Amino acid sequence: MPPSPTLTPLPSRRLDPEELLSELLPEDWALPLTKAGLETLEDLYDCAASLGSTWHRSFPGLGSRRAIALMEWLRDYGQDIGEITPRFFPAGAQKKENASTRLADTAFDPLIRPLEEINLPEPLSGAEGINRAPAIGCSLSANNDLDAIRTWLNARAGNPNTHASYRKEAERFLLWCLAEKERALSDIRADDAAQYLRWLEDLGRLEENAFLRKWRLPQSRWIGPKNAERATAAWKPFNGPLSSSSRKNAIVVVRQLFNFLKRTGYLIFNPFDQVSPKVPLLKGEGAPQAFADRSLTDAQWKEIVSHLDMLPEGLPRERMRLILMMGKSLGMRASEMLDARTGWIVRRRIGLTVRNAIEIVGKGSKVRRLPLTSEQIGIIESSLRARGIPGLAQSDPQTVLLINLGRGRNPGGAMSRSGLYRVLEGFFARVADEVSASAPMDAAKLRASSTHWLRHTFAVQALTRMSVNVVQAAMGHASVATTGRYLSPEEEEMSEAMSRMKAL
């Protein structure tokens, strides 16, 4: 009997749906998943969601222990990816003793409670806050800060994941105002806002005595076990120190809250307007890798298209052209490419014009509509003709756009995720072989490329032409923070400036 797999610590930080498994997981964990065509955390989540408790059996070499560890990891740090329920875990998995059960006898902290249990004392309600605007110009019916926060959540948190994320940050900040500063949220000024970021930097990192020399309440009042039930005494707003990305997210969300309260006339000013949006890296923290680093340059793309055009005429070439188009010019996920049907191609009124469009059924069955150019329609039509289908108008709406080409278990049927992964990996490897002599660094990047690099390339190019919110909608991102990780304007400006400097 082979030895049980050693469970390796996984990154203890907030996870992004687009992050690559190959970069996050130990090689022996990632390999069974990537060989089968999974690339990102989102792919892993979607697979487990569709297959249920037996999902790990599709990946020989992974094992149930690692499957359990992965699902616990996503549950703890994957709030932006999706909810992990018991059906994601292998049948018979031993559930860990819930932290709230272990601490059931812990006394309730009367001050640090979840948002739904907070009762604001009159002096801290914000009804008379120094930042309150005259009621005559306020478009909210809120009479106090807690009501105003609830109105903001209902107005701006459009889906459950966003609602949970926004609630958490608003809850943390409100509790900090009440318990640490002993002020109403409507009494907070710019210097208080700056202090909040310093407090987040210290929380969970300083020795208790050092922390108490700077701040009023001990860290033990703020930090508790992960996943404690909100209604129990074990619940705390934090479960440890925040990473740089989590601190940045905290400031971004609270700033958005104050913007809303200012624009609706509830508050006079936003105290975070004068706080730098840049969150410094603390000792031992490294800058997270930008998604832009995993995109292809114009020169690399030119080599890809050149190699594609030299392939023999026929279905393999037309299918590859379609794959590249779907990823690079539409930003489709691998799962969306595989699910795509001819019925997704429609005629719709966009603005004042009736145009061709594709209605992509994405994560969570959410549909996003993207316009299609005549060139893109031509690529789809050419692929269909190569299969003996005259065109879109003559096809069954359930006709898949990508099919197997006679190998594997389902020749002529829908292409599999592993099949898509292998086909694209082989194509990029052949392009890399062609350019390796003249451009070895480009060749190395091409060999590392995969289906998700096409989506990254779409995002980077789209952000040079569209606002981040438009690109967020085009890519189907739940959070604009994910889309923002493709932006690297400071690096680009630095690169251009330093390229004009002499070496000696």
Image (cartoon, helix red, strand yellow):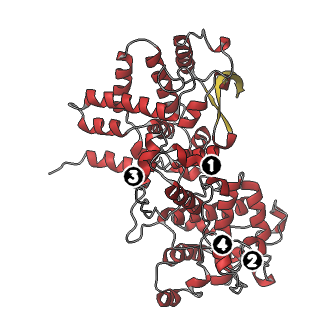
Name the secondary structure under disc 2. loop
The residue wearing badge 2 is 129
Q: For the residues marked 3 and 4, what is the alpha-carbon distance in whole angstroms?
A: 31 Å
> Could you tell which of marks 2 and 4 lies nearer the N-terminus?
2
Which numbered dot is residue 28? 3
From the viewer's side, name the closer residue of 102 and 392.
Answer: 102
> Could you tell which of marks 4 and 1 lies nearer the N-terminus?
4
Which numbered dot is residue 228? 4
Q: Residue at x 40, y 66 (%)?
A: 285
The residue wearing badge 1 is 478
Residue type beneath disc 3? Asp
Residue type beneath disc 2? Gly
Which numbered dot is residue 72? none
Residue mark closest to the camera, 1 vs 2 = 1
Residue mark closest to the camera, 4 vs 1 = 4
Residue type beneath disc 1? Ala
> Could you tell which of marks 1 and 2 lies nearer the N-terminus?
2
